[in-house]
Image: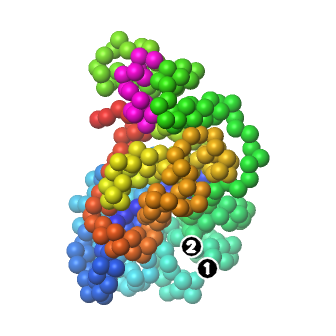
């Protein structure tokens, strides 16, 4: 199975929910599976494993998660597949769940159990036919490129006043701003939040400049532990986080010096901790999804290293994933952002020109995170990757992120 998470934002670009995008099979490996085997194991709903592994409080601050169900899996014993509160689960259906009595009755039954519902991919000319289904929905997801959103919003308000509208495939900041002008949408989904910065007319804030200086120090070959420790010592939050982590690891409550803590970690572990902790701090004034994106990309890239026969470069791949949104974090073009820190030529080649060996990993995790399953499947066939292994590598990245944001950086459960 393959699965990834798509964020849903409000007008303030705060993540309010996630939608799970999943695919059960690699159709490049079995092109006939879609015709002959799609209903195999149909009662298993992809996506619940992610919810169970992560917990809703990690996924979306205890908000809702949209889980797709099909015209067969809607009849599954859904309660047995997730221990999360029913009211936090939004079952996402599409036009394959027909406006027929059996389906309408099943939706009513699940709503009586406390589940919410959303519908997508209904064409405008089908809205009337799906009235019985729409009457039971909590959300409708509309592609703003295919629907007159202003007109649709006006019609839905009259006919379905309690139905919340979500604008999807919002892939540029301009589209997001235009839809905000229309107003009245509950959620926005798309790539608009991760658009690269192309101009460099923004000065780096003083606090960020300190963090960037620290990144530059630790990403130089054979950096001096003392220099790094002295810069850490200028930021209270980093000092507290470092001492908490090292004391937990060593179980030695006598470590109170930043230099002592840095020496205890050693160069390799201190470098990884600083890059992770500082990136989190640099993302503090950005949408929370930027932090999640950066950190999960980092761990996923590291986990992918053996599959791409780059295990010795796993630490560098971690850094590439971490810095893959550095332009957004620093509000500068990527070339200028990378000049602010010290990275290897392999990392800069991948991030600046999508070239070099590391670009293969970069392209793969970017395709995976947006559920470009055709491209992911193509690469898996060419590289002879196990789909289950790739999925586990992604799931482990989510679990690592969960532990990272619920515990001091670097501390282990």
Outermost residue to the right: 201
Main SS, magenta region, reads helix
State yes or no: residue 209 in magenta. Answer: no
What stretch of residues is rendered in magenta?
259-274
State yes or no: residue 263 in magenta. Answer: yes
Can residue 175 be spotted in the picture?
A: yes
Label 1 packing within 10 angstroms: few (<14), some (14-19), many (20+): few
| Mark 2 or 1, closer to the camera | 1
Secondary structure beneath dot 1 equals: loop
Q: 260 or 402: nearer the eye? A: 260
Q: 326 or 288: nearer the eye? A: 326
How far separated are the C-alphas under marks 2 and 1?
8 Å
| Image location (x, y in percent) of residue 27 | 33, 79
Q: 392 or 11: nearer the eye? A: 392
Quick check: 339 above or below 375? above
Give the residue displayed 32% in from the left and 24% down from the top: 248
Residue at image mark 2: 142
| Image location (x, y in percent) of residue 378 | 39, 75
Quadrant housing residue 272 = top left
Give the residue displayed 69% in from the left and 35% down from the top: 205
Give the residue displayed 41% in from the left and 16% down from the top: 260
Residue at image mark 1: 146
| Image location (x, y in percent) of residue 397 | 37, 50
Q: Is residue 34 left or right of residue 202?
A: left
Q: 370 or 264: nearer the eye? A: 264
């Amino acid at each position: 199975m393959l699965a990834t998470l798509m964020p849903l934002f409000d007008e303030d670009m705060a993540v309010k929910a996630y939608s799970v995008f999943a695919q059960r099979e690699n159709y490049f490996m079995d092109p006939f599976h879609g015709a002959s085997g799609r209903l195999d194991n149909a009662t298993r709903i992809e996506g619940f494993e992610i919810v169970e592994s992560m917990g809703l409080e990690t996924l979306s601050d205890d908000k809702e998660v949209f889980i797709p169900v099909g015209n067969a899996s809607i009849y599954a014993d859904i309660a047995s597949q997730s221990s999360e509160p029913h009211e936090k689960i939004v079952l996402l259906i599409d036009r394959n769940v027909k406006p027929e009595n059996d389906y309408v009755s099943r939706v009513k039954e699940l709503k009586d159990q406390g589940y919410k519902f959303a519908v997508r991919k209904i064409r405008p000319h089908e809205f009337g036919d799906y009235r019985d289904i729409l009457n039971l929905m909590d959300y409708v997801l509309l592609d703003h490129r295919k629907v007159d959103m202003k007109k649709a919003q006006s019609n839905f308000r009259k006919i379905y006043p309690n139905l919340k509208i979500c604008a999807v495939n919002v892939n540029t900041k301009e589209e997001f701003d235009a839809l905000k002008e229309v107003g009245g949408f509950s959620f926005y989904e798309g790539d608009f939040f991760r658009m690269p910065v192309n101009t460099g007319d923004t000065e780096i804030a003083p606090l960020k400049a300190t963090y960037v200086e620290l990144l530059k120090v630790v990403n130089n070959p054979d950096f001096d532990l003392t220099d790094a420790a002295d810069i850490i010592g200028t930021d209270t939050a980093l000092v507290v986080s470092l001492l908490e982590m090292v004391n937990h690891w060593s179980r030695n409550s006598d470590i109170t010096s930043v230099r002592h803590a840095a020496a205890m970690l050693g160069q390799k572990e201190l470098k990884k901790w600083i890059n992770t902790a500082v990136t989190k701090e640099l993302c503090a004034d950005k949408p929370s999804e930027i932090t999640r994106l950066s950190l999960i990309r980092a761990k996923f890239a590291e986990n992918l290293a053996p599959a791409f026969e780059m295990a010795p470069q796993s630490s560098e791949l971690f850094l590439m994933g971490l810095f893959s949104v550095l332009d957004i974090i620093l509000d500068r073009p990527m070339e200028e952002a990378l000049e602010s820190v010290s990275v290897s030529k392999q990392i800069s080649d991948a991030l600046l020109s999508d070239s070099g060996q590391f670009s293969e990993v970069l392209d793969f995790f970017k395709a995976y995170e947006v559920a470009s399953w055709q491209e992911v499947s193509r690469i898996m066939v060419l590289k002879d990757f196990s789909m289950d292994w790739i999925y586990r590598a992604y799931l482990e990245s989510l679990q690592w992120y969960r532990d990272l944001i619920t515990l001091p950086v670097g501390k282990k459960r």
